[in-house]
Amino acid sequence: MRVDIHNHTILCNHAHGSVDEYIKRAIELGIDIYGFSCHSPMKFDPKYRMRLEELDIYYKMIKNAQKTYGNKIQILCGLEVDFIDNRQDLIEQKILDYPFDYLVGSIHFLDEWGFDNPEFIGEYVKKDMEECWRKYLQAITHMAQTKLFQIVGHFDLLKIFGHTPNIKSYNLIKKALQTIKDTQMVLEINSAGLRKPVKEQYPSVNILEIAKTLEIPITFGSDAHSVDQVGYGYKECLEIVKNIGYKKATYFINKIPHEIEI
Ligand SMILES: [Zn+2]
Ligand SMILES: [Zn+2]
């Protein structure tokens, strides 16, 4: 069976195409379980996310799609929530109370710096990347410790423009993975990295091998921001995880984990 839990909607202001178009494409591709997890509202960087007042619209939009397409595909409704280290106060209580199927916890910011946004790529020359990786991985660990989220989005996103972690970062990578294991989170295999400058899925094979030794469950997300990105890179990702020894993927309904054979 095929699962894809990370897809966006126009409500985040930087995705294109309708919910219907995404779902029709997912059905065409033979995806069995298809989830939306658009950018959660937050009083930070509002340009790239839905507004808090739009949360009900988002939820209803996905619930309506569940009714329309329920006989062809299983539709899930989640959110991708930004975690900014030391700024947990930015997470809206309303999104935690809402009956979402799952929350994907993602790190797109180091302090104020949106490091995955090409608009701010100029910052990289000023940065010590080893220190950035230290902060990033510490943030992942802290995110897992909150136990607010079910899924870790794109575990090594900081490599997006090619700054992969060096060997010195691996102790912190292991610590982050151990925390993910201890807090029963699921690691997302995110294929968006394949279409970014790094040209590699998140997380890397090295990281996935460590995750497998810890028996951390996985799920799949194409992180589609347009219809043509739905299901992108799935075959490559599937082959990678199967070679590592993964046989199952996890998805969530009402925050309860379910497993399928992949
Ligand atoms: Zn986005
Ligand atoms: Zn993301």
Image: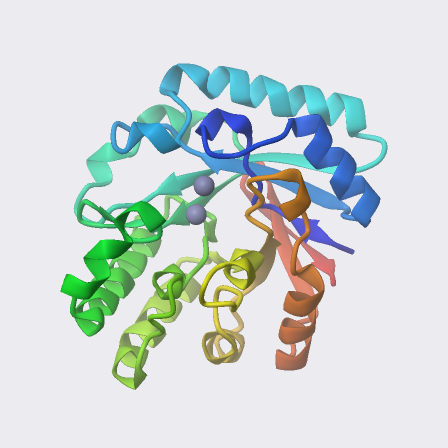
Residue 95 as seen in the image, left or right of residue 196: left
Q: Looking at the picture, does residue 17 appear above or below residue 194?
A: above
Say which of 101 and 129 sits in front. Answer: 129
Q: Quadrant of the N terminus?
A: bottom right
Say which of 234 and 105 sits in front. Answer: 234
Residue 117 appears in view: no
Residue placed furthest toward the bottom: 167
Q: Residue at (39%, 60%) from the top-left corner?
A: 157
Pinpoint residue 158: horizontal percent, then vertical percent.
34, 62
Count of numbered marks:
0
Pinpoint residue 226: horizontal percent, then vertical percent.
60, 39
Q: Looking at the picture, does residue 47 appear above or below residue 184?
A: above
Say which of 46 and 118 sits in front. Answer: 118
Colouring: rainbow
Please state the quadrant of the image where ligand 1 appears.
top left
Pinpoint residue 62: horizontal percent, then vertical percent.
63, 25
Q: Looking at the picture, does residue 65 appear above or below residue 170?
A: above
Q: Residue at (25%, 32%) from the top-left corner?
A: 44
Residue 176: quadrant of the picture: bottom left
Q: Quadrant of the C terminus?
A: bottom right
Q: Residue at (68%, 64%) from the top-left corner?
A: 248
Residue 76 appears in view: yes
Q: Looking at the picture, does residue 204 appear above or below residue 19?
A: below
